Image (cartoon, rainbow, N blue to C red):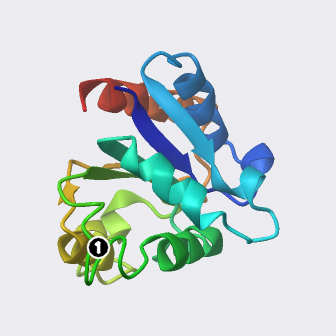
Amino acid sequence: MKTLIILAHPDIAGSRVNRRWKEEILKHADKFELHELYSLYPDFKIDVTKEQKLLETHDKIVLQYPLYWSNFPPLLKKWFDDVFAYGWAYGTGGTKLNGKLFSLAISAGAKEDMYSKDGIEGFSLQEVLSPFKATLNFVGAKPMADFASYGFLLGASDEDVENSAKEYIDFLLKL
């Protein structure tokens, strides 16, 4: 079964990193199903039933996005709010995500050392991601390893972008 990759970048055409990651994913269409939220829902009107059925048909789900103010981009947050619904993801009868495996693939603008107690962020990336992990626990899903690549707002070279794309596809192929 293919791994579902949900790409949530509000300006994929203007992105160096996520666009390059997308190009690599598309080279492996036999292994990955790419699902781009911003191209599907530019009006933020999410087809909840379609999204829920898509999640139901995959065991491994990767959420790929740029870190925005230590959080998800707006459409991905709305996607969670709408799709992880009472009676489907949690609550009475809400067991559809039980046992599903989730991973995050994040491009971060700041350098890795900035995500620490002593860094400008004041928190590690894992601490920043803890609300997502809590959500997974709440709905009975299971976390897999995450992928993060850092320093893209601070003058990353083309070589850095290429290296991150290679590292990302290697990560995905090993999930």
> 10 Å neighbourhood of mark 1: few (<14), some, or many (≥20)?
some
Q: Position of residue 128 (x, y in %)?
A: 32, 76
Tell me if residue 141 comes above or below residue 155 in the rendering.
Answer: below
Tell me if residue 26 comes above or below residue 84 in the rendering.
Answer: above
Q: Quadrant of residue 78?
A: bottom right
Res 116 visible:
no
Q: Position of residue 54 (x, y in %)?
A: 49, 47
Out of 83 and 44, give the one closest to the viewer: 83
Which residue: 63% across, 75% down? 74
**Quadrant (top left, top right, bottom left, bottom right) of the C terminus:** top left
Q: Position of residue 159 (x, y in %)?
A: 55, 28
Which residue: 25% across, 72% down? 139
Res 137 visible:
yes
Tell me if residue 118 comes above or below residue 14 in the rendering.
Answer: below
38 sits to left or right of 2: right
Which residue: 48% across, 64% down? 110
Q: Secondary structure at mark 1?
A: loop
Q: Give the amino acid at mark 1.
A: Gly
Q: Position of residue 113 (x, y in %)?
A: 32, 63
Residue bearing the label numbered 1: 94
Tell me if residue 7 comes above or below residue 111 in the rendering.
Answer: above
**Quadrant (top left, top right, bottom left, bottom right) of the N terminus:** top left
Out of 155 and 175, give the one closest to the viewer: 175
42 sits to left or right of 81: right
